[in-house]
Image (cartoon, rainbow, N blue to C red):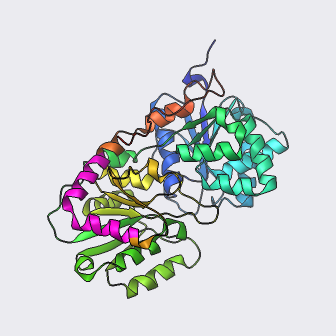
Amino acid sequence: MNASPEDLPLTIITHEFFPTKGGIATFVEEIALASHQLGRTVEVWAPQGRSNQERAFPFPVRRVPLRGTQDLACQVRMASEMIRHRRVLRRGAVYLPEPGPLLAMTYLQFFKAFKPARLLLTFHGSEVQSFSSRPAARVMVGRLVQIADRISTPSLFVKRLVGQRFPAALAKTVVTRGAPRSAFLAVEPAPIKTSDKIVVLAVGRLHPRKGQLLLLEALDSLPHEITRRVEFWIVGRGRRGDYEARLRRRAAEAGVPVVFLGNIDDDDLQHIYRRADIFAMTSVNHGHSLEGFGLAYMEASAFGLPVVAHDVGGVSEAVIDGKTGLLVEPGNVGALAAALAKLIGDRALRERLGSAGAAWARNHSWRESARALMDGIEDQPAPIAESSLVLSPS
């Protein structure tokens, strides 16, 4: 007798969940919500963290007593929790949507501690590079890939990368691109503005990979007759290193006004998106770190903002060049400045790209991603499948 979704509960084990912010945290939360809406019995395991913030979810959230730093101590603690509850986990599907719990599970497989009824993994991009560059991690993650029943990636780019580094993944990998977060889809795209002031908005943690400093350099290189009309708004904070300090020093010298907004909650972020004219996130490859997709591009598009981005990693699957935004070669500040100048000076182009972007973003669905991840998992452990949302530049 085949199992129904209700017969196979889904336990999502993660270090990235509310109140943690970021693309992976959004991905995990939305996949959990969509799986619940599709009839799955869902439970999320997430760190207790340092914050007392909590929010109501339509499924239980087990708060594990750890900070969620993803370091070795955090991984060992999560592995211990899995061992403690192994009898329950053996009867259901365990989903590891990001690197911390995935590494915790590699230790359990090394010691042959247990295997859940079904094991699902998600690779976002950067961790593939990191794991495959370290011999021990490559072997241990390779073993986990072999026993996994299904693997997901946010883009075809990352799917190809996983297949190159871990060939056993190819036959069981699906693409789960995701969509703008549900709360953002409930609002209409921003109305067309009549003000002469152009707001260029960047949203993301302040880190060299996100390229805010490159974006500031490009804006500051524009002629005064352009920059006098522009403000550069930056949402996000730096977690470590001196990148934020460097960015603030450069902003103080720039000829274009720069507004640092810090970390803000989703309600305030909606208002910021609606007040902006152009969204720009010029990600670059930085060591092992890369942009596997970029949910922020989709979110900005949902608000009707034209996008400027570097053509790296899986970004071209989130931003359609010439239709929803403009993609430029990374490292070419002149081309980046030209793209920005083109959008700043052409209101009709901004409106056309923004309108197409809103339709493009709203054509995506978290439920489709959840279906691609989970459908048939009871009967077919490793099918070859793709998300039904296939990128089309036409």
Residue 285 % position (x, y): 57, 63
Q: Is residue 12 visible?
A: yes
- The residue segment tinted magenta is 335-358
Examine the rendered structure and indicate whether residue 238 appears above or below residue 47.
below
The rendered magenta stretch, by its main secondary structure, is classed as: helix
Examine the rendered structure and indicate whether residue 133 appears above or below residue 228.
above
Q: Is residue 315 toward the left or the right of residue 96 in the image? A: left
Q: Quadrant of the C terminus?
A: top left
Point 48% across, 37% down: residue: 369
Q: Is residue 24 toward the left or the right of residue 223 in the image? A: right
Query: In front here: 3 or 125?
Result: 125
Q: Quadrant of the N terminus?
A: top right
Residue 354 % position (x, y): 27, 53
Taking the view exactly as shown, the residue that stands out farthest to the right is: 111
Query: In front here: 67 or 297?
Result: 297
Examine the rendered structure and indicate whether residue 224 appears above or below residue 55.
below
Point 45% across, 73% down: residue: 214
Q: Is residue 18 visible?
A: no
Taking the magenta stretch, the answer to whether it contains residue 287 is: no
Examine the rendered structure and indicate whether residue 381 appears above or below residue 270.
above
Q: In the picture, residue 232 is in which quadrant?
A: bottom left
Taking the view exactly as shown, the residue that stands out farthest to the top is: 1
Point 63% across, 47% down: residue: 161
Residue 113 % position (x, y): 82, 39
How many numbered discs, if any?
0
Taking the view exactly as shown, the residue that stands out farthest to the bottom is: 253
Taking the view exactly as shown, the residue that stands out farthest to the left is: 194
Residue 15 % position (x, y): 61, 53
Q: In the picture, residue 201 is in which quadrant?
A: bottom left
Query: In front here: 291 or 42?
Result: 291
Taking the magenta stretch, the answer to whether it contains residue 351 is: yes
